[in-house]
Amino acid sequence: MSGDHSDATIAQRVRRLETLLEEKGVLSGAQLDETIDAYLSGASPANGARVVARAWTDPDYRSRLLADGTAAVRELGFMEGSYQRLRVVENTPGTHNVIVCTLCSCYPLRLLGPSPSWYKSEAYRSRVVREPRAVLAEFGLDLRAGTEITVWDSSAETRYMVLPCRPEGTQGLGEEQLAALVTRNALIGTAAV
Amino acid sequence: MSWNRVSSMNRVSSMAEDRFPPGTRVRTFRHDPPHHTRLPRYARGKRGVVVEPEGPAELADVSALGDGHAPVEQIYAVRFDARDLWGEGDHHVVLDLWESYLEEDRADER
């Protein structure tokens, strides 16, 4: 589970296992590709951005989203059939949230798409729980002194997504235009909108 | 005190959502188990405060065995002060921890 999965022992083991399964006729490569495609289909940060834009424009939806993230994103058709729970954590002018998985690379894939390689790197995973302010500064996010930072380490079945602060001067924008402002890193908490 | 996979398999979990109500001060076990666990090393033997229950799930330490006999336990979101984890810092870290990893941190035992 190092930053570079291609060289990892686990990757070699998975490749060997794949080969064996195919050789023994248990599974075909096409079946495997199909399964992976089905898993990834529709997984995109555009989904998380849509959820955020809805929360910014609909206070009732925002309340539901913060109270029960799983149910609220299902209202928009996301995470159907997932056994995982989603918790959405809200940034405010005085508080900032950032997500990590220190043990491996747990990530709300269906809402954020495949995770960036830095999210899986040992450097990010080990440092963000210890010195988040310094790590966020390296991402170009300089938080105001006194901002309370909470790091959410996804150690069990819950996945996390950040609800960023709505930027000033966006009162006139519609949901679609707002969604276009929301980046993947803002949903992880390593950027602001 | 410590926990291990064998005792976890034999224990009867309380499975009550309110064993550790929000605000309860808890302490994580210090034990370093030889098997898979979801209690990261940096959070062992540390004091924290329960945020809220996260819902029940099979105990990962046992389900990792793959024999289908894992006990289902409540998971709790627990907030730790950076200072308690690292001796410095002003942020918080929240971890999702199975009931087996936690014991109440009673004021009279501190």
Image (spheres, helix red, strand yellow):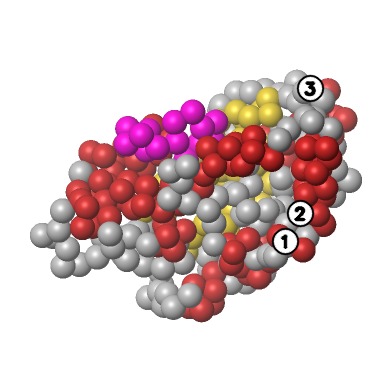
Query: Compared to A165, does A137 lie above or below?
Result: below
In the displayed structure, would residue B14 be above or below residue B85? above
Verify whether residue A75 appears in magenta: yes
Residue drawn at the location 22% of the way across and 52% of the way down: A176
Label 1–label 2 contact, CB within 8 A: yes
Q: Residues within 10 Å of mark 2 (few under 14, many from 20)?
A: some
- Seen in the image, is A65 located left or right of residue B107? left
Q: Name above or below for residue B19 compared with residue B79.
A: above
Quadrant location of the C terminus of chain A in the rendered image: bottom left
**CA distance for labels 1 and 2:** 6 Å
Residue type, numbered disc 1: Ser
Would residue A189 be visible to someone looking at this image? yes
State whether discs 3 and 1 lie on one chain. no
Give residue B25's mark: none
* Residue B104 magenta: no
Q: Earlier in the sequence, mark 1 or mark 2?
A: 1
Secondary-structure class at tag 1:
helix
Please give the residue where the numbered disc 2 appears in the rendered image.
Answer: A11
